[in-house]
Amino acid sequence: MALRIEREAAAGVALVTLDRPAKLNAIDLETAGELAALWQELRYDESVRAAVLTGAGTRAFCTGIDRAVEVPQPPSPYALDDPLLRIGPKANDLWKPVIAAVEGMACGGAFYLLGEAEFVVASREATFFDPHTTYGMVPAYEAIAMAQRMPYGEVARMSLMGTAERVSAERAYAVGLVSEVTEPGGAVAAALRSAAVIAGHPTDAVQGTVRAVWCAKEAARTQAMAQAPALIALGNLPPDRQAELFGVRGASGEPRVR
């Protein structure tokens, strides 16, 4: 199992942990399937009224899709199979609140998860970045998800700068991506405290509020995501060229943190 789930029955809260620390909690096909199944399971679990999502260890919350994964693609340029599209709670029709707790790096495909969390709590040492453009890839879904949470210029800068720059927790807080910054190691505890408060409220009102807030951005998100497959198909370099660029990443030096 690539996921750990701990239920605190008295509080009505579940702690969901991406448990692949050796892979910086990158998501392979097994993990993607487990996430989708878990969110669907929680729809029926009345003992869980709120959830916290985090990553094992302190190096990374999640670094997106595992680069060792091979995802077969249909031959048509009009079709694109993306295994990360179903890993979030909203994609699985879960309207119980989910809070993300970030320690370390959150990058690339991690934004599929952060984009479907109600809010994000981050350690002071957390960093956010999107490496796609560095490797000749279009971060369409990631940028769309972050455009719902960050000002346009901040999303554009993060998406375009690739690995050259990382957004600090303090900067993420200033622009609205993060709602609370904790001391290192404190993100999960802070998120669990908030989740317990929310879980103590009448659940129908809570889920209705989650749905109402999501409705405020859902139409624009749906229209934008409909354009994503074509943008990716047109803009991505061939996989072998992406792998070549990935292999020489170290030559560009350390990223700037702001």
Image (tube, rainbow, N blue to C red):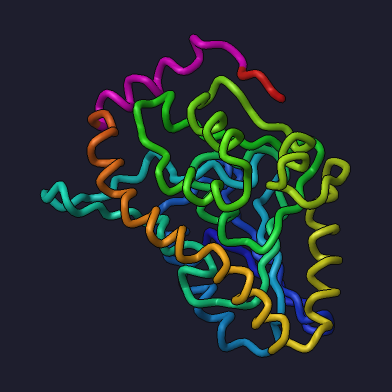
Question: Compared with residue 211, is residue 193 higher up or lower down, i.e. above or below?
Answer: above
Q: Position of residue 52 (x, y in %)?
A: 70, 64
**Horizontal side of residue 137 vs 81, given as left or right:** right
Q: Position of residue 188 (x, y in %)?
A: 79, 56
Quadrant including the C terminus = top right
Q: Residue at x 42, y 55 (%)?
A: 84
Q: Position of residue 80 (x, y in %)?
A: 25, 52
Q: How many marks?
A: 0
Q: Nearer the viewer, residue 194 or 35?
A: 194
Q: Residue 23: in sight, yes or no?
A: no
Q: Residue at x 79, y 70 (%)?
A: 195
Question: Compared with residue 201, is residue 179 higher up or lower down, i.e. above or below?
Answer: above
**Horizontal side of residue 46 vs 174, given as left or right:** left
What is the magenta range? 239-254
Q: Residue at x 22, y 50 (%)?
A: 72
Q: Nearer the viewer, residue 248 or 49?
A: 49
Q: Main secondary structure of the magenta part?
A: helix
**Horizontal side of residue 192 vs 126, given as left or right:** right
Q: Is residue 247 magenta?
A: yes
Q: Nearer the viewer, residue 159 or 60?
A: 159
**Horizontal side of residue 28 vs 157, given as left or right:** left
Q: Nearer the viewer, residue 193 or 26?
A: 193
Q: Position of residue 102 (x, y in %)?
A: 71, 48
Q: Residue 53: in sight, yes or no?
A: yes
- Determine which quarter of the picture holds residue 239: top left
